[in-house]
Image (cartoon, rainbow, N blue to C red):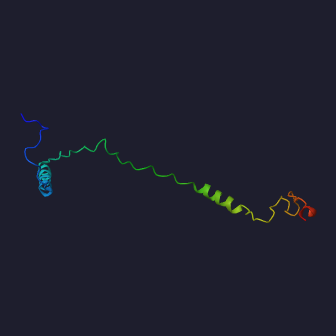
């Protein structure tokens, strides 16, 4: 029995890539023609796909609530910057809480 690791009896021939590509293509086409897919049965999708259920319809808002909300919105008084709201003191009456430190003129000279 010849050894698998024995030296070849003849020197290696140049490798023919086109012959190898043709052999691979032939094997692929033969396997492709021999492939028989499993037939699809009715009900095979069970367990793989969720059943579609319509979502619940949203509840319609009550008309009375909308009218009350709209009325309260219209009755609101807008706050404008620079104007005092009713019951508040004006900005001129507020005390100035920020005091600037006095600069010592002699220290700068």
Relative side of 57 to 26, left or right:
right
Residue at 34% x, 46% y is: 51
Vertical order, 71 against 46 (above or below) = below
Relative image position of residue 58 (x, y in whole percent): 49, 52
> How many marks overall?
0
Residue farthest to the left? 1
Nearer to the camera, 107 or 89: 107
Q: Nearer the viewer, residue 27 or 89?
A: 27
The percent position of residue 66, horizontal first and vertical second, equals: 61, 57
Question: Which of the 4 image quarters holds residue 99?
Answer: bottom right
| Residue located at (93% from left, 63% from top) | 106
Q: Residue at x 68, y 63 (%)?
A: 74
- Residue 101 position in % (x across, y down): 88, 58
Along the line of sight, the residue nearer the viewer: 94 or 90 = 94
Q: Is residue 63 left or right of residue 52?
A: right
Q: Quadrant of the C terminus?
A: bottom right
Residue 46 in the image: x percent, y percent? 29, 42
Name the quarter where the N terminus is drawn: top left
Relative to 61, is 8 on the left or the right?
A: left
Image quadrant in which you'd find residue 104? bottom right
Judge by depth and name the residue closer to the eye, 23 or 72. 23
Q: Residue furthest right?
A: 106
């Amino acid at each position: 029995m010849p050894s698998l690791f024995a030296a070849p009896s003849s020197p290696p021939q140049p490798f023919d890539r086109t012959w190898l590509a043709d052999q691979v293509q032939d094997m692929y086409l033969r396997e492709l023609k021999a492939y028989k897919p499993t037939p699809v049965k009715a009900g095979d999708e069970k367990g793989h796909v969720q059943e579609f259920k319509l979502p619940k319809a949203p509840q319609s808002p009550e008309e009375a609530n909308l009218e009350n909300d709209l009325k309260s919105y219209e009755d609101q008084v807008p706050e404008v910057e620079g104007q005092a709201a009713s019951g508040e003191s004006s900005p001129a009456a507020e005390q100035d809480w920020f005091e600037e430190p006095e600069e010592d003129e002699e220290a700068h000279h």
